[in-house]
């Protein structure tokens, strides 16, 4: 059975949203918010998978799960208000309900790469789909080599998960570098583009898997920098975003060359998509 | 006590540099320390030096009237600070402020330019060491200018 359909086996129908209550709402920054949903039944997911969230009367959008895959009784989503649906979701409060379908898609292959060094590179809201990988690595720390996380954002005010960033910064054997594009004089961290910070992380390129999530222009440049550092392109994974609608590969809205982002992705090995990325019309 | 050539030898900038050239450029160098908040140089001032950061962090800043001071890049351990000494009118185009205790090797720009003029081989060695980081900073500045984090949800 295809993974997408297996993932939805607990749903009555993969196209039918289930009314699900919001149990917690957190404002991360001016534009970004996080909320927890309490599904009727635990909804196991793989880090990197996404759900379709329906704001009633407005519309439905795909949102990656940003919570802990080992606590599937609570589904956490982190969203940036950029359009009418995400703006409507941003007005929810605890006790409100949203339509939930999922989880869908192929996530990060974190379990397949035990024993290797792991690099995670996130840009902007791209940290949200990688947070479940961080939770996984922290719970299974001994199973992996060195771990490094690079996170880039516009300004210090745009950083998300700030409390956890501080925790991760203090975590032994966990390399975290955060770079913002501009900052006031009170910021003493890195300022600049995030990719050059790769040179500040310790890892063995021959035994490293890298996962990138962020704007496409960023992950193209980052993937090249990782290759330049000696990491095989087959061990570089990117999470892609396209116009996902049905989420099960039927409607074709998210077709990307021979692939459907919703069911073949959103996480793809870079060597599968690198040539397609140069086609501007895709 | 380490002399300036020893300090230079341990900086990534000098990697692969032959001893003669090392000694030659060390003649233009001295060791400097800046406390947090101290400036290496200020916008509009004569750009008569550049620095190899041995340890610490420096914020490159610009003041925007009505909005305050913004940091657009941080320069840290092992990196080069200052490029305006390379081309006329040798004037600093931004502020450089230590944001932590910073130790650096300071080079007299005119002294080094004169040595590069006198020996193009030295000039070429310097160019090979300056162009890659400057090009990387240019590429990074392009990415920052694109406002790429303004994209939609992931």
Image (cartoon, helix red, strand yellow):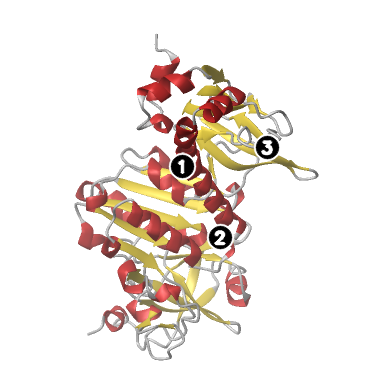
Q: Tell me the residue that label 2 is attached to.
A: B149
Spot occupied by residue A196 in the image (x, y as percentages of width and height): 45, 47
Residue found at x 44% / y 45%? A197
Say which label, 2 or 3, has the lower sequence index. Answer: 3
* Location of mark 1 (residue): A166
Residue in view at x 47 percent, y 44 percent:
B132
Q: CA distance from mark 2 to mark 3?
A: 25 Å
Give the residue displayed 44% in from the left and 44% down from the top: A177
Task: Look at discs 1 and 2 and give the one toward the viewer.
Answer: 2
Query: Real-space Cα distance between discs 1 and 2?
Result: 22 Å
State the residue position of label 3: B94
Q: Is residue B93 above or below residue B110?
A: below
Q: CA distance from mark 1 to mark 3?
A: 31 Å
Q: Residue furthest top?
A: B1
Query: From the image, which quarter does the N terminus of chain A lie in?
Result: bottom left
Q: Is residue A221 left or right of residue A211?
A: right
Q: Is residue A46 left or right of residue A279?
A: left
**Label 2 Cα crowd, 10 Å radius (few <14 / some 14-19 / many 20+):** many
Contact (Cβ within 8 Å) of mark 1 with mark 3: no
CB contact under 8 Å: marks 2 and 3:
no
Viewer-side residue, A195 vs A55: A195
**Total numbered circles:** 3
């Amino acid at each position: 059975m295809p993974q997408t359909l297996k993932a939805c086996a607990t749903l009555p129908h993969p196209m039918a949203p289930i009314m699900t209550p919001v149990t917690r709402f957190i404002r991360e920054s001016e534009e970004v918010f996080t909320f927890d949903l309490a599904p009727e039944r635990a909804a196991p997911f793989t880090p990197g998978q996404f759900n379709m969230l329906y704001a009633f009367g407005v519309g439905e959008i795909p949102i990656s799960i940003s919570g802990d895959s080992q606590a599937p009784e609570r589904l956490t989503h982190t969203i940036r208000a950029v359009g009418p649906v995400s703006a409507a979701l941003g007005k929810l409060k605890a006790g409100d309900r949203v339509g939930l379908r999922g989880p869908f898609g192929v996530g990060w292959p974190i379990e397949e790469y035990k024993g290797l060094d792991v690099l995670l590179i996130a840009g902007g809201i791209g940290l949200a789909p990688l947070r479940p990988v961080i939770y996984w690595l922290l719970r299974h720390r001994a199973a992996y080599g060195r771990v490094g996380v690079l996170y880039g954002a516009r300004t210090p005010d745009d950083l998300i998960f700030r409390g956890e960033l501080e925790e991760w910064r203090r975590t032994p054997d966990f390399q975290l570098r955060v770079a913002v594009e501009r900052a006031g004089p009170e910021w003493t961290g890195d300022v600049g583009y995030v990719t050059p910070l790769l040179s500040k992380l310790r890892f063995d390129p021959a035994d490293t898997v890298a996962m990138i999530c962020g704007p496409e222009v960023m992950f193209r440049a980052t993937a090249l920098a990782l290759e330049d550092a000696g990491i095989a392109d087959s061990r570089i994974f990117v999470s892609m975003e396209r116009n996902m609608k049905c989420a099960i590969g039927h409607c074709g809205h998210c077709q990307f060359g021979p692939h459907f982002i919703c069911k073949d992705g959103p996480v793809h090995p870079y060597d599968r998509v690198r040539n397609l990325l140069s086609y501007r019309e895709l | 006590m380490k002399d300036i050539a020893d300090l230079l030898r341990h900086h990534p900038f000098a990697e692969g540099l032959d001893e003669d050239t090392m000694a030659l450029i060390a003649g233009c160098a001295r060791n400097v320390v800046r406390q947090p908040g101290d400036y290496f140089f200020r916008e509009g001032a004569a750009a008569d030096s550049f620095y190899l950061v041995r340890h610490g962090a420096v914020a490159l800043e610009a003041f925007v009237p009505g909005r305050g001071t913004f940091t657009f890049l941080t320069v840290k351990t092992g990196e080069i600070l200052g490029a305006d000494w390379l081309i006329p009118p040798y004037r600093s185009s931004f502020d450089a402020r230590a944001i932590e205790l910073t130790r650096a090797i300071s080079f007299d720009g005119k002294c080094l330019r004169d040595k590069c003029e006198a020996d193009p081989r030295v000039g070429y060695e310097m160019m090979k060491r300056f162009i890659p980081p400057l090009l990387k900073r240019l590429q990074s500045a392009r990415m920052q200018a694109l406002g790429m984090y303004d994209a939609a949800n992931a």
